[in-house]
Amino acid sequence: MKIKQYLMLSVLSLLAAAAFAQTNPVCEALVITGHPAYPPVAWGADGKIVGSSTVLVTAIAQQLQVKKITSIDFGSWQKAQDAIKDGKADIIFGIYKDTARVAYMNYIDPPYMQDPVAIVIRNGDSLKFSEWSDLKGKKGVTNVGESYGSEFDAYIAQNLTVARANGVDKAFEALLSKQADYLIIGRYPGKLEAKKLNILAKVDFLPKNLVYGDMYVAFSKKSKCYGSLQAGFSDGLKKVVSSGTIDGLLDQANKQFYK
C-alpha cells in the first residue's frame, strides 16, 4: 500500500469515531493550500501541496462528506496566503496566528501541532544564542511570507535586521554566501531542506529554539464553507491532538518526502 493511502486510511479510521456536528453533506468542494517548502508539514509536488497536513485536512473534510477537495500549490508561501485573502482558496494549514492574518482568516481551534523554530548559522561560525537580544546587531534572513507569532514578529520589527529571501533555498544561499549571519527557519523543514540541498554539513542548527509556534488550520473569511464546517473541523482536530496521531503523520510524511 502506498504511504499516502496508508496515512489517509489511518486518519479516517481515527476520525470515524469522532462526534461531528453534522452528518449530511454541507460543503460540495474545498480548495486547500499550504507552504510549498515546509516538509514534512507541507511541500509542493506536481502543482499540489502534499505532506502530513494535507493528509490531515483531507481526511477531516472527507469525514464531513465534502465531495471534492483540491490541493493547489500557489507557488510560494506568500502567494498561498494571498490566495486565502482573495478567496481563491478555502483552507490554509500549517499557519501561525498573528494579528494581520486574523483580519482575513478564521482560525480553527485547537492548533494541531507545535513547530520549533531554529537559528541556523554557517558550520564553523560561532553565535551565542540564549535569548532574542543576542541577535541584535547581526544580519538575519528568513523566507518571505513567514511569521513567527505576533510577539517575535514585533521584536524583529523593533530590534533586528532580518531580510526576506524569495524561497527557502534562497535563504540558505544568503546564509552560505555571508549575506546573512543567521537564518530563521522551522527546525523540521530546515533540516530536511538542508539535506535535500546537500548542504547539511555546511550549516549548524543551534540547539536552543527561537520560539515554538502553534500551527493551525484556517479558513478564508471569503469561504462559503467556513460556517458549516467549523465545528466539524474543530472536533476532528481535537481528536487528532488528543490521540497523538500527528507524530505518526509527520514520520510517514518524512518517508514520503524521501521516497
Image (cartoon, helix red, strand yellow):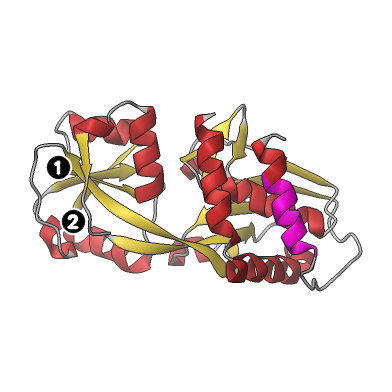
Q: Secondary structure at mark 1?
A: loop
Q: Secondary structure at mark 2?
A: loop
Q: Which residues are magenta?
A: 7-16
Q: Is residue 50 left or right of residue 165?
A: right
Q: Is residue 135 left or right of residue 233?
A: left
Q: Is residue 88 left or right of residue 139?
A: right
Expressed as whole percent of the image width and height from the top left, the position of residue 32 reads 66, 47
Residue positioned most to the front: 1
Q: Is residue 22 above or below residue 217?
A: below
The three-letter amino acid code for the residue at tag 2 is Leu
Residue at left offset 14%, top offset 56%: 135
Is residue 13 in the magenta section? Answer: yes
Expressed as whole percent of the image width and height from the top left, the position of residue 17 reads 79, 68
Overall secondary structure of the magenta section: helix
Badge 1 vs badge 2, beta-carbon distance below 8 Å: no
Expressed as whole percent of the image width and height from the top left, the position of residue 104 reads 57, 61
Q: Quadrant of residue 142 in the image?
A: top left
Residue at left offset 80%, top offset 58%: 63
To which residue does mark 2 refer?
A: 160
Is residue 105 visible in the rendered structure shown here? Answer: yes
The three-letter amino acid code for the residue at tag 1 is Asp
Residue at left offset 18%, top offset 63%: 132
To which residue does mark 1 refer?
A: 181
Q: Is residue 193 left or right of residue 44?
A: left
**Foreground mark, 1 or 2?**
1
Is 83 or 109 nearer to us in this picture?
Answer: 109
